[in-house]
């Protein structure tokens, strides 16, 4: 306990780190306050009624990411999600289109162009999503003004709200600690945790229920530790650089490592798989009179059914290999190593190096995909065991992976500040690894 207080004291004794932490907390408070401001023209009392039924399915997952701003018709109702969608689209285009590949290789100027294109695409996505959001999710009885005027003004306000969230994220990255966009998503998820844990406590109620509640907390702790292990697990490939003699000095010759993460794809396979799992539920709305479609929809709509969990797990395994293949290019890594005078001991440069890296990547991605699928179906298993639905969402899935990844990133930055000022780090081993670590090549 004494070491914890000493570490906290060391953190706040570094002026730059202290200012960054305060800035981050201030920006997050602004984001949460904006999430509670209802759109002009909406009956705030009715839409903020705690007894009102929330969204389910994909909309419920989106509302969970935004900390309730989506269901409350907030000015931050779309949050940072349009920017995330635009970033995913640009990332896929970078793999598929030579034009974007060329820009990516242009260095800082290319990245600035890609960021500008991403921002413009974000505005376009905002305008489309805001019109659908206003017309499809906000019920007419909550609107107090003319519908046409409300739709037009809400589209402008929601788009401006998303742009402001982008600005907050960039400010957190520049003036605060951690990745700003990820921090905004994490604070939205964490804002639901106190209410969920209190609801679970009320759900258990009696003395025997209190014992089950403690067991649930212990189980949650071990699940979080397993996700941390999955997030940090890497396979290190030794890289040797050739010596170069320039004048009287010898350069290179040192050995480094190429870290290949067991879970290189992050949360994207779960997001893609869950998006497809909502399709059967959409079919039930188009064919309400078909008993066959309704029975299929009921099986694939409930996260506690065997059919849902098996299908979700298989989709996650497939998408893990797919997303890993488009984000990590063994040929490019082998070319970069060859260009910089690096090689894997015992492996010839060029194509043999690429095949070796691809083989290692396949071997570590397979168990990683199974573990990721298991993490995704944990909430369904928890609900099957009697855990309340909102609290069960913290037992795995996208929410837990995002929270663990963002916390590790932030701790990694704090660790670097402490070590840079010659303080003892947060961990004795000094091996906090975030998602931001990249390969040596």
Image (cartoon, helix red, strand yellow):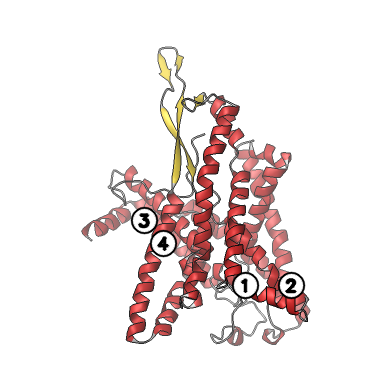
Q: Which residue is mark 1?
A: 57
Residues at marks 1 and 3 touching, judged by CB atoms closer than 8 Å: no
| On screen, residue 334 above or below 12 | above
Tell me where residue 208 sits by quadrant: bottom left
| On screen, residue 67 above or below 22 | below
| On screen, residue 75 above or below 406 | below
Residue 40 coordinates in the image, percent (x, y):
65, 78
Q: Which residue is mark 2?
A: 283
**What is the spatial separation of the Cα atoms under label 1 and label 3, in whole angstroms?**
40 Å
Q: Which residue is mark 4?
A: 224
**What is the spatial separation of the Cα atoms under label 2 and label 1, in whole angstroms?**
14 Å
Q: Secondary structure at mark 1?
A: helix
Tell me where residue 156 sits by quadrant: bottom right
Q: Is 379 situated left or right of 140 in this image? A: left
Residue 417 coordinates in the image, percent (x, y):
36, 47
Residues at marks 2 and 1 touching, judged by CB atoms closer than 8 Å: no
**What is the spatial separation of the Cα atoms under label 4 and label 3, in whole angstroms?**
28 Å
Q: Secondary structure at mark 3?
A: helix
Q: Earlier in the sequence, mark 1 or mark 3?
A: 3
**What is the spatial separation of the Cα atoms under label 2 and label 3, in whole angstroms?**
52 Å
- Give the crowd class for mark 4: few <14, some 14-19, many >=20 residues within 10 Å: many
Residue 152 versus residue 295: which sits nearer the camera?
295
Residue 33 versus residue 246: which sits nearer the camera?
246
Q: Earlier in the sequence, mark 2 or mark 3?
A: 3
Q: Which residue is mark 3?
A: 18
Foreground tag (1 vs 3): 1
Q: Which mark is residue 84?
A: none
Q: Earlier in the sequence, mark 4 or mark 2?
A: 4
């Amino acid at each position: 306990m004494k070491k914890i207080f000493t570490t906290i004291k060391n953190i706040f004794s570094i002026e730059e780190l202290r200012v960054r932490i305060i800035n981050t907390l201030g920006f997050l408070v602004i984001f949460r306050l904006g999430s509670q401001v209802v759109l002009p023209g909406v009956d705030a009392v009715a839409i903020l009624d705690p007894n009102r039924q929330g969204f389910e399915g994909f909309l419920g997952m989106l509302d969970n990411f935004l900390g309730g701003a989506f269901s409350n018709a907030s000015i931050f109702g779309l949050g940072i999600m349009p920017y995330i969608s635009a970033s995913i689209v640009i990332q896929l285009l970078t793999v598929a289109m030579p034009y974007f590949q060329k820009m990516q290789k242009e260095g800082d100027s290319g990245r600035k162009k890609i960021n500008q294109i991403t921002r413009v695409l974000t505005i376009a996505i905002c305008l489309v999503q805001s019109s659908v959001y206003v017309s499809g999710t906000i019920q007419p009885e909550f609107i107090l003004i003319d519908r046409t005027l409300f739709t037009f003004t809400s589209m402008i306000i929601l788009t401006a709200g998303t742009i402001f969230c982008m600005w907050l994220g960039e400010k957190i990255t520049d003036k605060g600690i951690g990745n700003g966009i990820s921090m905004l998503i994490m604070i939205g998820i964490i804002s639901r945790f106190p209410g969920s844990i209190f609801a679970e406590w009320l759900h258990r109620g009696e003395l025997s229920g209190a014992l089950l509640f403690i067991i649930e907390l212990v189980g949650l702790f071990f699940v979080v530790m397993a996700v941390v292990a999955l997030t940090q697990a890497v396979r290190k490939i030794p890289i040797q650089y050739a010596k170069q003699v320039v004048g009287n000095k010898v350069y290179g010759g040192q050995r480094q490592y190429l870290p290949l993460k067991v879970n290189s794809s992050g949360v994207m396979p779960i997001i893609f798989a869950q998006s497809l799992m909502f399709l059967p539920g959409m079919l039930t709305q188009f064919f309400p009179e078909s008993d066959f479609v309704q029975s299929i929809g009921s099986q694939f709509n409930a996260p506690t059914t065997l059919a849902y969990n098996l299908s979700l797990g298989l989709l996650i395994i497939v998408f893990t290999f797919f997303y890993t293949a488009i984000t990590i290019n063994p040929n490019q890594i082998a070319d970069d190593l060859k260009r910089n005078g690096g090689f894997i001991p015992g492996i010839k440069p060029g194509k043999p190096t690429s095949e070796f890296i691809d083989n290692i990547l396949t071997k570590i991605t397979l168990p990683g995909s199974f573990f990721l699928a298991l993490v995704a179906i944990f909430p369904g298993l928890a609900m099957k065991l009697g855990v309340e639905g909102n609290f069960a969402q913290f037992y795995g899935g996208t929410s837990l992976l995002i929270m663990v990844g963002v916390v590790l990133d932030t701790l990694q930055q704090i660790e670097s500040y402490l070590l840079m000022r010659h303080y003892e780090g947060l961990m004795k081993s000094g091996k906090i690894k975030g998602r931001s670590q990249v390969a040596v090549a």
